[in-house]
Image (spheres, rainbow, N blue to C red):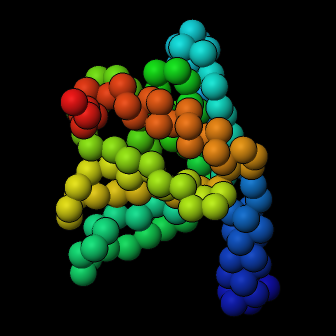
Amino acid sequence: MHRGVVAAALLALLAVTSSCSRSTGKLSPELLQQLQGEGIVRRADDLWIRYSHGIGTSRGGWEEHRASIVVTGARILIHQNDRVLIEITELSTGRYSLRREGDRLSLRSGEGRSARSWAFHPMDDPEGWAKDMRRVLERTAGAVRQP
């Protein structure tokens, strides 16, 4: 066989295997037990999530990845299996907000040049997702309280 044919075959095999869907929802037994103890309110595995960074800057950009989301009474977790992309709990001191546009939710963290967002379309009940996620955000240590 010619090297070109072998290289093309390897590239085709790589394209096929990388396009196969692999779940992003696997969690360690310990973390899953913690989440269940907090009461899982919402969970969606393998959603397309648009991660945006450097919002409003010349170096800003975005990427789309498959990831999973778990919302409990005390936590928002966006992850790819055991890789945590963002975790928000009562102890989180950052600035967070959630915006809903139709069936799209956008979770934003940080301010100014350090702002980042994770936008996704839940499979069902975007209004319920937004309500449950805002409930967690209102309890964070960094939440802005109204007098």
* Relative image position of residue 2 (x, y in whole percent): 74, 89
Q: Which of 7 and 11 is in front in this view?
A: 11
The quadrant where residue 19 appears: bottom right
Visible residue check, residue 138: yes
Tell me if 9 is positioned left or right of 74 in this view. right
Position of residue 38 relative to residue 71, above or below, is above
Tell me if 104 is positioned left or right of 55 in this view. right
Position of residue 131 relative to residue 118, above or below, is above
Query: Residue pushed farthest top?
Result: 37
What residue is at 52 percent from the left and 21 percent from the top? 73
Position of residue 66 relative to residue 23, above or below, is below
How many marks can you see? 0
Visible residue check, residue 65: no
What residue is at 62 percent from the left and 22 percent from the top? 40
In the picture, the quarter occupied by the N terminus is bottom right
Q: Which of 146 and 44 is in front in this view?
A: 146
What residue is at 75 percent from the left and 87 percent from the top? 5
In the picture, the quarter occupied by the C terminus is top left
* Relative image position of residue 7 (x, y in whole percent): 68, 81
* Relative image position of residue 59 (x, y in whole percent): 26, 76
* Relative image position of residue 33 (x, y in whole percent): 59, 12
What residue is at 24 percent from the left and 75 percent from the top? 57
Position of residue 68 relative to residue 106, above or below, is above
Q: Which of 135 and 86 is in front in this view?
A: 135
